[in-house]
Image (tube, rainbow, N blue to C red):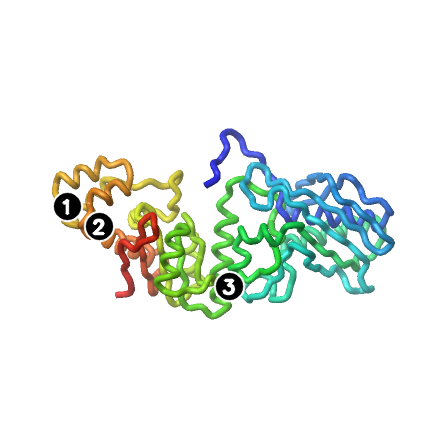
Amino acid sequence: MTRKPDGPLRKGWTTGACAAAAAKAALEGLLTGAVPGRVGIRLPKGQLPEFETVERSLSPDAAECGVIKDAGDDPDVTHGATILARVERGAPGSGITFRAGPGVGTVTKPGLPLPPGEPAINPMPRRIIGDNLADLADRFDAALDLVVTISVPGGEEIAKKTWNPRLGILGGISILGTTGVVVPFSCSAWIHSIHRGIDVARATGLIHVAGATGNASEAAVQRKFDLSDQALIDMGDFAGGMLKYLKSHPVQRVTIAGGFAKLVKLGQGKLDLHSSRSQVDFSDLAGLVAAAGGSGKLVAAARKANTAAEVLALAQGLPLADLVAKRARSVALATLGGGEVDVLVVDRNGEELAFTGRD
C-alpha cells in the first residue's frame, strides 16, 4: 500500500486535462504553423492551468503534441505518462470526432457512460477538450470540424494495473476526470470504479456480484462460486460505497468476501473499513467471544488484545468467525434494504474461515 506523504499534498491534473492541453496546442499549431511550447486551458471550475508540451510535430494537414501527466502527490498509475493528441481537419459540418490511438482503450461492453465501439475518452474529458478547442477556433474564426486522436505510449501496459480489462475496455487506458484536477489520495476515484463495475455487471445480465476487500478474498470468492471477472467488484475498504450503490442499482445476489478484521468492523456497523477511518471495537468483539462460548479469561484477553487477528488466534476452536459473518451479513442487509446477501470470511492465505448465505 502506498504511504500518504506527510504535510500538505500537491494536487495534479487528470488525463482528461492533459489531453485537452495537448489537443489545444496541436490545434494552435494547425492554425498558426507553430505548435507552442506551453499552453493554457480552462477547466470546468474556472482554473486556468498551463502545461509544457513535448513531442511536437506539424504537417500541412495535422499537428500533434503531448503533455506529460503530473498526478501531484497522488499514487496514480498514469503519473508520468505522455498524453498525445493529434488534431487534423475533418469533413465540413462533422464537428469534433474522437478516436483512440495506441494506448487508449475502446469500450466493448454496455453499462459504461459510452456505448461499445467508442474510444474510452469519457464524456467530461470530451467536453473539456471540446470547450478548449472551441475557444481557440473562435479566436481564429476557424471551423470546429476536427478529428482528435488521443494516444498514450505504453498505455496498454498501464491499463493492466487498472479496472479497464474487467470493465471490457480493451487496448489501453481511459481518458478520465470530471474536474480536470487530481485530488491526492481521494476516495472518489475508487468509488467511481466500484459504481462502473456494478453498471457493467448489470448491463451484461449478471445476477450475482461479489465485493472483496483484497486479492486473497477476491480469489477465494471467485473459486467458491466460479464467478467471471466481470462479477468481481474491487470493493476494497469501501463496503458502504458498494452497498449503497447496489441499493439503487440492485442485482439479485451479492456476496461480500473479506478478511476477519475487516468483516469484524463491518459487523460493528462500520461501512468504511480502512484502518485510518475505522477501528475494531475490542469490547464488542470480546462480547462475541463470549457468545461463541469463550471462557471469562478468554473474554478478558480479547478485550485487551491489540489486533483482531490476535483475538481470532485466542479463540481457536470457537465459532467466532461464523458469528462475525452473520453480523456482517446483517449490516449489509440493512444497508441494502434486503435482498440475497452472502458473507465469506477468509484468512490471510485466502482459506475459508466462515460462510453465511441465504436463509
Q: How crowded is mark 1: few (under 14 residues within 10 Å), some or many (20 or more)?
A: many
Q: Which amino acid does label 1 sit on?
A: Gly
Quadrant location of residue 111? bottom right
Between label 3 and label 2, give the one nearer the viewer. 2
Q: Are marks 2 and 1 in contact (CB under 8 Å)?
A: yes
Between disc 2 and disc 1, whose residue precedes?
Answer: 1
Which residue, as the protein is rendered here, is positioned at the far left? 296
The first of marks 3 and 2 along the sequence is: 3
Q: Which mark is residue 200?
A: 3
As drawn, is 175 to the left or to the right of 33?
A: left
Q: Where is residue 78 in the image (x, y as percent from the top left)?
A: 60, 46
Q: Can you see residue 93?
A: yes
In the picture, the quarter occupied by the N terminus is top left
**For numbered disc 1, what is the local secondary structure?**
loop
Dot 3: few (<14), some (14–19), or many (≥20) neighbours within 10 Å? many
Which residue extends farthest top? 7
Secondary structure, mark 3, is: helix
Using residue 22 as the reference point, say whether residue 120 is left or right of it. left
Label 2: how many Cα within 10 Å (few below 14, some 14–19, many 20+): many
Give the residue type that dot 2 points to.
Leu
Q: Residue at x 12, y 43 (%)?
A: 295
Establish if 56 lies above or below 95: above
Which residue is located at x 47 percent, y 36 percent?
Answer: 3
- Mark identifier at residue 294: 1
Q: Residue 320 carries which label?
A: 2
Q: Position of residue 316 (x, y in %)?
A: 20, 47
